[in-house]
Image (cartoon, grey):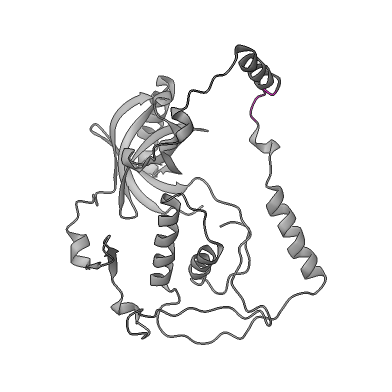
Amino acid sequence: MRSIWKGAISFGLVTIPVKLFSATEQKDVSFHQVHRDDGGRIRYKRVCTKDGEEVPYSDIAKGYELATGEIVVLTDEDFEGLPLSTSRRIDVLQFAPADQIDPIYFAKSYYLEPDAQGAKPYVLLRNALESSGQVAVVKVALRQRESLATLRVRDGVFVLETMLWPDEIRRPDFEFLDEDIEVRPQELKMAESLIATMEADFDPTAYHDSYREALQQVIEAKVAGKEVMAPAEAEEEGGPAVDLMAALRASVEAAKRERAGEPAKGGKAAKAKDVEEKAAPKRKARKSA
């Protein structure tokens, strides 16, 4: 694994230098958008919707769309004035029982490895936290975003789990919650009996992604049957390889649909994914996203 961030746990007067690693990876079969007839990759250009001209990356800025449809353009100076911590500290705010934190708040998990000089205080805090049965509530700034997070111990290693802010948790405002639905005692007893018959210790290794395995078999069968197309010769391109504005626009549109509760549209999602994958055009299909 490769560390993606370096900083320190700040616990009272104790500072523990650590390195951050992604604790999870999403396994998937990656695809490109290609021309059906010859397998050529589909390319995108940064085009202004007002004048139809292609826009160089140096002229692209971030824009916030108002409810009226008007755009507020933000400059680098606007972002520099924001109160985002750059101290690279994981500040311990308090300690709390783990069962008081609803799992819905958790966003992403990371492993923390101590630097050589921080190994002893790391182990000290780890052992004390583990014996207390609690988790540390912390604040950290990662990737231009400040988050609450928790520190807990898993397999002898600190796990940092970033959290959503309270106003990012959507309320389940469903009509059936206001209905007076009667459940008979016999029905409840039967449901509880069914749960009891299916009760077992959880073993995550007992489950697997059957869809991904079947999809990989389809790809391997096509390879075995020589149903492949030769890649086109690489062309020299000027400027950045990634259409960041298109990726940003597609991501924002997808996020808006998700917040509105609408199903994802395959075309837009596929375009966003393809744009991101253009960052590494020489990579082959891979299993992990």
Q: Is residue 16 visible?
A: no
Which of the 4 image quarters holds residue 234?
bottom right
Instruction: From the viewer's perspective, tell me whether residue 237 is left or right of residue 96.
Output: right
- Report if residue 62 lies within the magenta region: no
**What kind of secondary structure does the magenta stretch mostly adopt?**
loop
- Residue at horizontal 70 percent and vertical 51 percent from the top: 211
Task: Estimate the x, y position of residue 286 in percent, counting from the top left.
Answer: 62, 62
- Residue at horizontal 50 percent and vertical 87 percent from the top: 236
Task: Estimate the x, y position of residue 88 in percent, counting from the top left.
Answer: 28, 48
Which of the 4 image quarters holds residue 133?
top left
**Looking at the image, which residue sits at the far top?**
185
Q: Is residue 278 above or below residue 130?
A: below
Task: Estimate the x, y position of residue 221 in percent, counting from the top left.
Answer: 80, 65
Which of the 4 image quarters holds residue 17?
top left
**Looking at the image, which residue sits at the far right?**
225
Query: In terms of depth relative to the viewer, which is nearer, 80 or 257?
Result: 257
Query: In terms of depth relative to the viewer, which is nearer, 198 or 188?
Result: 188
- Residue at horizontal 62 percent and vertical 81 percent from the top: 40
Q: Which corner quadrant holds the C terminus? A: bottom right
Task: Estimate the x, y position of residue 263 in percent, counting from the top left.
Answer: 52, 54
Q: Is residue 70 above or below residue 144?
A: below
- Report if residue 199 lies within the magenta region: yes
**Looking at the image, which residue sits at the far front?**
180
Q: Is residue 226 visible?
A: yes
Report the number of discs: 0
Q: What's drawn in magenta, residue-wise?
A: 198-202
- Residue at horizontal 40 percent and vertical 79 percent from the top: 46
